[in-house]
Amino acid sequence: MAGDQNPRPTGGPDDVPPGAGQGWTALSYLIAGMLVWGFVGWLVDQWLGSDGIATGIGVVLGMAGGVFLVIRKLGTPT
Amino acid sequence: MFGQANVLAQGEAAFPPSVEDFYLPSILPWGAENSYWFTKITAMVWLAVGILAIYFLVSYRKPQLVPTKKQWIAESIYGFVRNNIAVDMIGHAGVRFAPYFTTLFCFIVLTNFFAIVPGFQISPNSHIAFPAVLAAISYVMFIWVGIRHHGFGKFFKNSLIPPAPWYILPLLIPIEFFSNFLVRPFSLAVRLFANMFAGHMLLLVFTLGGFAMLNASAWFAPVSLLSWVMTVALTFLEFLVIVLQAYVFTVLTASYVQGALAEEH
């Protein structure tokens, strides 16, 4: 059974994963990205009177930004 | 407590429990309407503070090389928070935050634990005010620590400007600001509050639901019994949530402090 265990990446002596907060960080970036730029898009929609196109573009842009941030901040350990 | 049980037996408790059930009657002006200055909730918070202060003082009054049982438990709790949260998340610089994290962890565990202690049966943290204050302390602390460590300009530059080409920075900086300075305290407070609120609500639904069905018709007695068995099972689930949420709150605070202390990526 001992052979079944996955090797621990940084080898902590305990069961706590080394970056327990990283999951929450990633989640918060993804959600924050959509919310912030979705809101900006919604404001643009209100301003131009367009029918939610800007909101959609904003959400997609924000999601892209969020994914980018997750990759940059958490993806490449130095 | 017994009055409550009588009310239940007579079928006078309103069945679908509501937010009203979280506002307990006033204690100090005894039974006063709409007075929330000193209620059971307030009493429990002070009790938790008292228990923790006295317990840690007493168990470490005469520290022994071979610890007594009391001292061993207190040391284990502190050691757990120091090694598994502070040092694990922050590194050696984390040791100086360990006392605060231990206090935070113990306070949240104990106040959460009131949710399933017979006679208390509600957690102060099921009112948003208490998690909000705890989150505000963590929020101010990680910003303060960051400014102390890096200086004002460098701290905000670190936490707002990600390593990226200049042309996508306008897209990223608002996201960073929103997620680092607005979402963090909010999610910290709401996560703890919502878990304790939902836990209390679930227990209320299953307990009161059992009585409501029993009062509706004697034929429902087996279903009521099932509902109460579920209450017991959910109480064990609550225990898991209680410890887990205290742990998550402390770990996230540690992770924010770590982010504030970290050098540029």
Image (cartoon, helix red, strand yellow):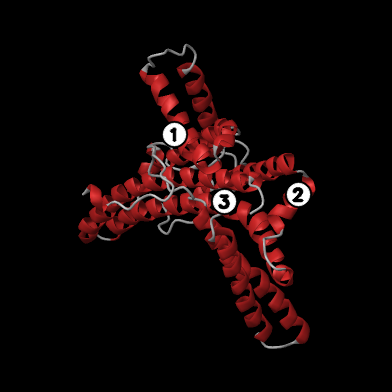
Sort mark 2 into few (<14), some (14-19) or many (20+) by Cα contacts within 10 Å: some
The image's mark for residue B188 is: 3
Using the image as rendered, state which of residue B141 and residue B191 is in the foreground: B141
The earlier-in-sequence mark between 2 and 3 is 2
Residue B34 image point, x, y percent: 61, 45
Residue B191 image point, x, y percent: 52, 53
| Alpha carbons under labels 2 and 1: distance apart | 33 Å
Picture quarter containing residue B98?
top right
Return the residue at label 1: B80
Give the SS element for disc 1: helix
At 69% from the left edge and 60% from the top edge, which residue is drawn? B177
Picture quarter containing residue B213?
bottom left
The image's mark for residue B187 is: none
Horizontal side, residue B232 vs residue A50: left or right: left
| Extreme-bottom residue of the structure | A50
Q: Quadrant for the N terminus of chain B, please.
A: top left
The image's mark for residue B154 is: 2
| Alpha carbons under labels 2 and 3: distance apart | 25 Å
Give the SS element for disc 3: helix
Using the image as rendered, state which of residue B207 and residue B105 is in the foreground: B105
At 35% from the left edge and 51% from the top edge, which residue is drawn? A7
At 57% from the left edge and 69% from the top edge, which residue is drawn? A67
Task: Say what amino acid the circle numbered 1 marks.
Answer: Phe
At 34% from the left edge and 49% from the top edge, which residue is drawn? B237
